[in-house]
Image (tube, rainbow, N blue to C red):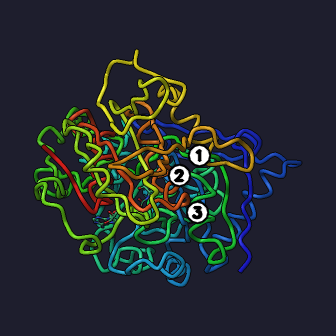
């Protein structure tokens, strides 16, 4: 199968107009496409394929790229599981382009009716459960998925819910995603567009790398802004639960009426302790080929001796650095076999890339045919007497930059064929995004080291 990567610039598709009404952020969306724009043509082609084909379409959202299919057609939804090789007991998130579309599904009316008459509905008969209304008002469109009861006679294909009586719904905050859903005129089931077990894709090239030859269409809207998947919440349980951490934090949720007592309902893998686990013994998720060794925040960085244990025969080791680690080349420009945790920014050398611009550089590096790969530093280090090739990525010190760059860094180091990836963790108490980053890294890690 030939895979086309279609570049679409959201600024060139035409005009998007939100149609609001009281208490709603995005009741409906009007899309007026430009008539002479390649970008608009590509978007229409993708929408047409979503409507008629059983091969899923990859598209950008603000969190990660999604692999979309018409959520109402079984054969299309099966295409997602097939392309990703995802186990079919893992339910999918359904993406909506407007509240009208969500209400139509919850009231199980034919979509065509509400497209015409939607404005006539009034809030008293709103089929959206009350508990979710403050969340929707505050966080939609945005990186928040809510668990809703799947109505009787639901038009959702049974493959979407994997046998559950509920479904996850989200309205993405991305112009291309919203316009695409509106043009397709059906809710779109979409998991992250990576091959199952791999890190989530935050750029079109990641999707092409994993799914090239398995799907026909990838809309390339540039790198994703958030870089971590949405927060998943269940307001049907009491107290409400966070099922997956994401950009919206527990503190933010607790400010909403009915959500004051929100609890964490996901397992924090770190609570299992610092016991190194044998590679390959865990259920893999977000995992590059090379084993990930995660240093929890506050743990001293590895000594030369410790590091040399992680280096296998090919002598290549990858680093993902975040807040405090730097390579200390203070010894007259010659690398020394030591990594020091330093918040003192005055220790620098020409070998140490500035942390400030971590993400911008990373994106440039990953688009390597368009840009020089100047942010992926390579140098050799003498570890316990042998020379080791280091591939080093600094994500920057800002949490948003770290979230944006984490999955891309894991993927880049895989391409560089390192035998181990050493990651400097961050403090997950710093907020929702930090919790999301550490949740994914702990799942990716073969070994977690904490003090
Ligand atoms: O940011 C995102 O959410 C991305 C983009 C593409 O929107 N999508 C995404 O989808 O991450 P996926 O399929 O990779 O993750 C779906 C998550 C899983 O953790 C799944 O278990 C949970 O949502 N989920 C879906 N439906 C559920 C349900 N009915 N009950 C509980 N959890 C559900
Ligand atoms: Mg996923």
In the image, residue 449 lies at what x, y percent?
A: 19, 50
Residue 147 seen: no
| Residue on which the image places disc 3 | 207
**Label 2: few (<14), some (14–19) or many (≥20) C-alpha neighbours in 10 Å:** many
Instruction: Report how far apart the C-alphas of labels 2 and 1 lie in the structure.
Output: 6 Å
Instruction: Report how far apart the C-alphas of labels 1 and 3 lie in the structure.
Output: 11 Å
**Label 3: few (<14), some (14–19) or many (≥20) C-alpha neighbours in 10 Å:** many
Quadrant location, the N terminus: bottom right
SS state under label 2: loop
Residue at position x 64%, y 71% in the image = 212
| Foreground residue among 345 and 84 | 345
Which residue in the rendered view is the most extreme toward the front? 385
Q: Are marks 2 and 1 in contact (CB under 8 Å)?
A: yes
How many numbered markers are drawn?
3
Q: Earlier in the sequence, mark 3 or mark 2?
A: 2
Q: Are marks 3 and 2 in contact (CB under 8 Å)?
A: no
| Residue on which the image places disc 2 | 202
| Residue on which the image places disc 1 | 223
* Residue 17 vertical position relative to residue 63 in the rendered view, above or below: above
SS state under label 3: helix
Q: Quadrant of residue 248?
A: top left
The reply, left or right, for residue 9 in relation to residue 302 is right
Q: Is mark 3 within 8 Å of ligand 1?
A: no
The reply, left or right, for residue 3 in relation to residue 315 is right
């Amino acid at each position: 199968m030939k895979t086309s990567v279609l570049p679409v610039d959201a600024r060139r598709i035409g005009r998007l107009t939100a149609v609001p009404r009281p208490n709603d952020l995005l009741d409906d969306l009007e899309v007026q496409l430009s008539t002479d724009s390649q970008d608009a043509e590509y978007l229409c082609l993708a929408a047409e394929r979503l409507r008629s084909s059983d091969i899923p379409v990859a598209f950008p959202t603000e969190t990660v790229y999604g692999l979309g299919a018409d959520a109402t057609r079984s054969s299309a939804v099966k295409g997602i599981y097939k392309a990703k090789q995802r186990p079919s007991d893992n339910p999918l998130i359904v993406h909506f382009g407007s509240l009208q579309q969500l209400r139509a599904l919850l009231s199980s009316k034919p979509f065509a009716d509400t497209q015409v008459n939607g404005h006539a509905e009034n809030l008293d008969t709103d089929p959206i459960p009350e508990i979710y209304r403050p969340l929707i008002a505050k966080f939609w469109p945005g990186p928040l998925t809510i668990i809703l009861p799947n109505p009787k006679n639901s038009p959702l294909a049974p493959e979407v819910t994997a046998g559950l009586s509920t479904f996850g719904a989200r309205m993405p905050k991305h112009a291309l995603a919203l316009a695409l859903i509106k043009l397709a005129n059906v809710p779109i089931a979409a998991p992250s567009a990576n091959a199952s077990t791999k890190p989530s894709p935050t750029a079109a090239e990641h999707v092409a790398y994993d799914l090239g030859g398995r799907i026909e269409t990838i809309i390339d809207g540039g790198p994703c802004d958030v870089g971590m998947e949405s927060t998943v919440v269940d307001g049907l349980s009491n107290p409400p639960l966070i099922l997956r951490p994401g950009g919206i934090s527990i503190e933010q949720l607790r400010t909403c009426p009915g959500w004051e007592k929100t609890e964490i309902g996901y397992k924090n893998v770190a609570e299992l302790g610092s016991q190194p686990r044998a590679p390959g013994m865990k259920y893999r998720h977000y995992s590059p080929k090379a084993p990930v060794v995660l240093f929890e925040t506050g743990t001293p960085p590895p000594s030369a001796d410790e590091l040399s244990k992680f280096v296998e025969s090919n002598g290549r080791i990858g680093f993902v650095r975040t807040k405090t680690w730097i390579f200390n080349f203070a010894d007259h420009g010659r690398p020394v076999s030591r990594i020091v945790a330093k918040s003192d920014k005055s220790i620098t050398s020409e070998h140490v890339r500035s942390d400030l611009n971590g993400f911008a550089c990373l994106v440039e590096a990953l688009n390597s045919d368009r840009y020089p790969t100047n942010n992926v530093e390579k140098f050799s280090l003498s570890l316990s007497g042998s020379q080791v090739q280091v591939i080093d990525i600094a994500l920057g010190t800002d949490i948003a930059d770290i979230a944006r760059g984490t999955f891309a860094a894991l993927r880049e180091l895989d391409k560089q064929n390192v035998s181990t990836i050493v990651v400097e963790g961050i403090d997950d108490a710093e907020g929702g995004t930090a919790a999301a980053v550490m949740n994914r890294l702990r799942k990716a890690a073969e070994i977690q080291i904490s003090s």
